[in-house]
Amino acid sequence: MLMSNKPKKRCGAQNRLNWKSLPLLVWLFCALGCSSSYLEGSIGDDLSLNFDYIRIRSQDFFMAVEFIRESVRGSEKVCKLVVDTEELDLESSGYAVENEQFLQHVELSRTTYENDVFPEVKNGSLNFENFGMNGNDDVGGGFLVLFKDNRTLRGAFYGSVEAF
């Protein structure tokens, strides 16, 4: 499934994220029953967010969610989130990783043939609707990221864990 990154109209206050309401927004994205994975945000004005499929992997205490695009040159990781769960108590936090915990335990990266990378992350929130680390566990959730240059990235992911 190829996702679109059509530019969105943004104006004034509508483009600003209210970080106090960020956990609620992520929860709403997940709770509304989003059944497909997506990437979007103002960062898509400069970087392609098109992808063909997602892959969710786990090893030890690490979970990787990869948004992958296939091209004639091979696979590209349009967006990759790696979550270090070792020191996180996800159950007591409602399966949410926010603010300082997001900055400390979530790594956001991008590997494309154009060598375009994400800017430095200023803040973020990740919320799991379904969570598991074992092979074939269903995993789903959503995330919001604010970059230091004030561009944004948001997305949702749904799939099964591939343990390796």
Image (cartoon, rainbow, N blue to C red):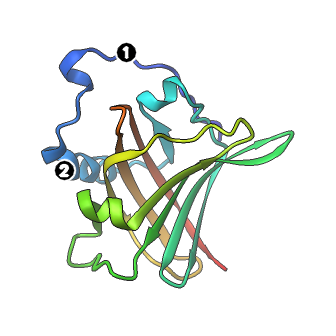
Residue marked by disc 2: 24
Image quarter of the C terminus: bottom right
Amino acid carrying mark 2 in the image = Leu
Q: Is residue 34 above or below residue 89?
A: above
> Is tag 2's residue or tag 1's residue first in the polypeptide sequence?
1
Residue 163 position (above or below residue 125): below
Specify few, some or many for label 2: CA neighbours under 10 Å numbering under 14, 14-19, or 20 or more.
Answer: few
Q: Give the quarter of the image for residue 106.
A: bottom left
- Residue at point 41% right, 19% down? 8
- Residue 84 tag number: none
Q: Is residue 56 left or right of residue 86?
A: right
Q: CA distance from mark 2 to mark 1?
A: 23 Å
Q: Is residue 100 left or right of residue 112?
A: left
Which of the 4 image quadrants contains residue 4? top right
Question: Which residue is label 1 attached to?
Answer: 9
Q: Position of residue 67 (x, y in %)?
A: 59, 50
Which element carries disc 1, helix, strand or loop? loop
The residue at 46%/60% (across/down) is 107
Residue 138 in picture, x, y percent from top left = 49, 70
Judging depth in this view, the residue of 6 and 17 nearest the camera is 17
Query: Residue 142 vs residue 17: left or right?
Result: right
Q: Residues within 10 Å of mark 1 (few under 14, many from 20)?
A: few
Q: Position of residue 142 (x, y in %)?
A: 38, 53
